[in-house]
Image (cartoon, helix red, strand yellow):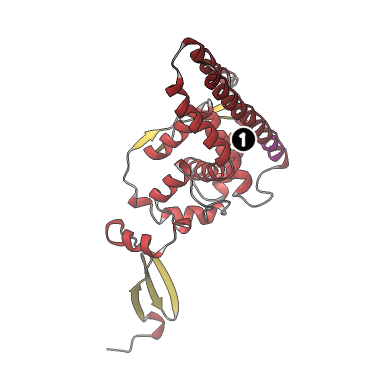
Amino acid sequence: MGEIPTTQFMTGFNSPLGLNVSVVGGDILAHNTFDFQEDYDDYIENTPIVARFDYLTIQTLITEGIEKHEAYEMPLAEYVHNRDRFAECDETEKRRLSFYLPQFPSMISSDLASSFDLSHHKFMIMIIELGLIIFKYDYNAQYTIITEGRKELPKKLTNDTRRIHYLQLDKQSISLGTCTNVRSNSTKHYAPNVRGWLYNAISNQANYLNMSMSDVVYLSWCFGVTRNLEEGAIPPVLANDISNILYQFDTELDIYCNRIKQVTSDINACY
């Protein structure tokens, strides 16, 4: 038997992050062989939380928020690569997420997906995750005021006067207009299957902020395409539209926070 050429010589070992690493002819090749049951404990032990990309960490990021994570403003391609390593580990239930996007951003989104060699639905889900991460970090103070206020106020409704003040909150909503003129074909409807934890995160945010789920998705999309794609990836006219939308959101969010504070003060003053 002839000698095996050195370029075909192969050895293997496991990295602490669940990668099987092969050395072929001096080149190191990493293979995605992460096993959730066998490797997850080692991954958690050896990886700081701000560098983890398993679904449990991402779920925590978009629901509870933690210190600044590596996913924050991470380039999309890098984020997709990191998330794909753990795709088979997430066996949680799926739910159909129904939402609308305005026609122009929807068309651009489809072209962007193609440029990343991703299906449009996968591109949307990854961008939405990144946008939610950005929102949770950048707006943590405002969101905490709203969520804590909404949780505590019902406990104080001991008379009709307090109830009247409380009902004022229902008049304060945040709208980005994504569902406007749905029947005039100026919007596009989507209904991808997403993990239940992602669906619930979007639903909860919509509930607390008095927003439609479509508006929460669109807001997240706006954050994602402007902060996780390279400069110039989206056309200037869309970038300008998004800038106006985010300014509108900031304004309405401040108004809502102030309304929460005012209603709390009015209720506390009632006996």
Front-lying residue, 164 or 33: 164
* Quadrant of the rendered image containing residue 134: top right
Q: Does residue 189 show up? A: no
- Rendered location of residue 104, percent (x, y): 63, 33
Q: Is residue 36 above or below residue 262?
A: below
Q: In the rendered view, does 190 fall on the left or right side of 4?
A: right
Q: How many marks?
A: 1
Residue located 44% across and 53% down the image = 83
Q: In the rendered view, does 36 fall on the left or right side of 127?
A: left
**Quadrant in which the N terminus is drawn:** bottom left
Q: In the rendered view, does 203 fall on the left or right side of 168?
A: left
- Rendered location of residue 123, percent (x, y): 51, 44
In the rendered structure, does residue 115 fall within the stretch colored magenta? no
Which segment is the magenta one? 238-243
* Quadrant of the rendered image containing residue 240: top right
The residue identified by callout 1 is: 105
- Rendered location of residue 238, percent (x, y): 68, 38
Q: Residues within 10 Å of mark 1 (few under 14, many from 20)?
A: some
Residue located 57% across and 54% down the image = 75
Q: Amino acid at mark 1?
A: Pro
Residue lying furthest top: 160
Front-lying residue, 204 or 185: 204
Residue lying furthest front: 271
Residue located 57% across and 19% down the image = 266
Front-lying residue, 134 or 227: 134
Q: Secondary structure at mark 1?
A: helix
- Rendered location of residue 261, percent (x, y): 58, 27
Predominant SS of the magenta segment:
helix
Q: Does residue 218 show up? A: yes
